[in-house]
Image (cartoon, coloured by chain):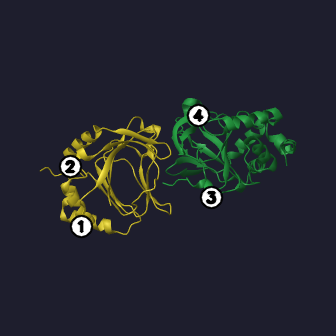
Amino acid sequence: MEHIINPIYKKKDSIEKLQKAWNTKEIFPHILLTKIFPQVIYKQKEKEIKILFFKRESRPDRYSFAQAKASSLHIFDNKELHAFLSEVLQRKIKHILGEAYYFSWKDYKVVLKEQDKNAIDIIFDCTEDWKEEYGGSLIYKDEKGRYIKFMGLPNTMIIIERKNTEKYIQYVNNLSKGKKRYLLIGKIS
Amino acid sequence: MNIQEALSEKFLQEWIKQEYRKKEKIADLKKRFQSNTPFPHLELHHFFNEQKLRKVLQSLEKEEFLEKESDLFKFMQTHDFATSSTQELVEFKEFISSKSFLVYMEEITGIKLKDGSIDISASLYQNTDYLLPHDDQREGRKIAFMIYLSNLEAQDGGKLILYKTKGSIPREEEKAITPQFNSFVFFKVTNKSFHEVEEVLVNKQRITIGGWLHGAYHKSHLQEKRQY
């Protein structure tokens, strides 16, 4: 069977470092894993994501984006990913709920009331050729106004503990010129 | 103070163009305010004394504009004019919060306003700046107002968009107002007053003075405020 996680992250010392990073008492406990998938797998997943059946969703006071079911990608239901995350987060991960999205010019998602603000978000970012000035950053903000921002990156996984933070996706502006920001957004409750 | 007394006040005569102080005009504005859709509003061109408004614009050059950014907006804004050390801005706030101006606004809108209770500041939108759809509902706000201090073309972006709602959910754009120097735009703040400032698409500055006129605050008015 083909391995989907970059072998470098599965080494014992890497796992220990990631466990340590996860347990650090940060304001926004998170881990950012660049090159999470081997390049061949990433390119294959990237291609599959782009041909998903995306449907536009809009409610002007809340959001505007394109959304697709992500189950056919077999990323969030991948046993190897579950085992990897279980080791890093030191808890049994059996299930990740998630969807695929893309954000292009004029898209956004404001802070919405969420049921489970203590979940762990698992984000797979497969955005190519993106600049911070385009907007579209994924932002987590706490009640004191402190925030952490994730701009578009290719082949990157973000694991972040919500801890009652608010989440939003910045408006994508006209500088993005036809580009799309692809994200798989999943959650462990 | 009634509308006749308000119209005879020096402040009003100095600041509002004569055309807008005529009895018949006021009666017409009153009708148009109520009948305009998607929610009661007016867009009045060449409203203020132009010379005085240009001085206000000049005085804004001395003001500090601070970056404002959240999930809903990105633009720059001054502090409330009440804290300004510039005489023209303090005087402008005094005029907007004066009894005579509030009586004038009450006459047009039919909304009871609270004496001297206003918020007023200036905003600057540049390329890529925006304000996403929202209803402006917050404690005591009765009328939202904007005074445009720059000219934009429709293709420049930066238009004020008014949304048609179904229930209290914004559905589609119904009206777009392109900023023109010395236009005075105001609308009734309700749970249906969804509007946005469209992203500015060019390297032009969109400068406005804006704020809210306040009235009595009833908690029930805000029941549907951002409950998500």
Is disc 4 on the same chain as disc 1? no
* Residue ID for mark 4: B175
SS under mark 1: helix
* Mark earlier in primary sequence (3, 4): 4
The residue closer to the viewer here, B106 or B48, is B106
Give the percent coordinates (x, y) of residue A158.
32, 55
- Would you say the residues marked 3 and 4 are in contact, meaning their CB atoms lie under 8 Å apart? no
Look at label 2 and name its amino acid: Pro
Q: How far apart are marks 3 and 4 (CA)?
A: 30 Å
Q: On the image, numbered disc 3 is attached to which residue?
A: B219
Label 4: element kind: strand
A145 up-or-down from B209: above or below: below
Q: In screen coordinates, is A104 left or right of B4? A: left
Mark 1 to mark 4: distance in Å? 58 Å
Residue drawn where x is 74% and y is 44% of the image: B110
Q: Say left or right for B178 vs A188.
A: right
Give a yes or no on whether discs 3 and 1 share a subunit. no
Q: Residue under circle 1?
A: A16
Residue A179 position in % (x across, y down): 38, 37
Q: Residue at x 40, y 61 (%)?
A: A117
Q: What's the mark number on residue A38? A: 2
Element type at marker 2?
loop
> Which numbered tag is attached to residue A126?
none
The residue sitting at the left extreme is: A1
* Amino acid at circle 4: Lys
- The answer to whether tags 4 and 2 share a subunit is no
Amino acid marked by disc 3: Lys
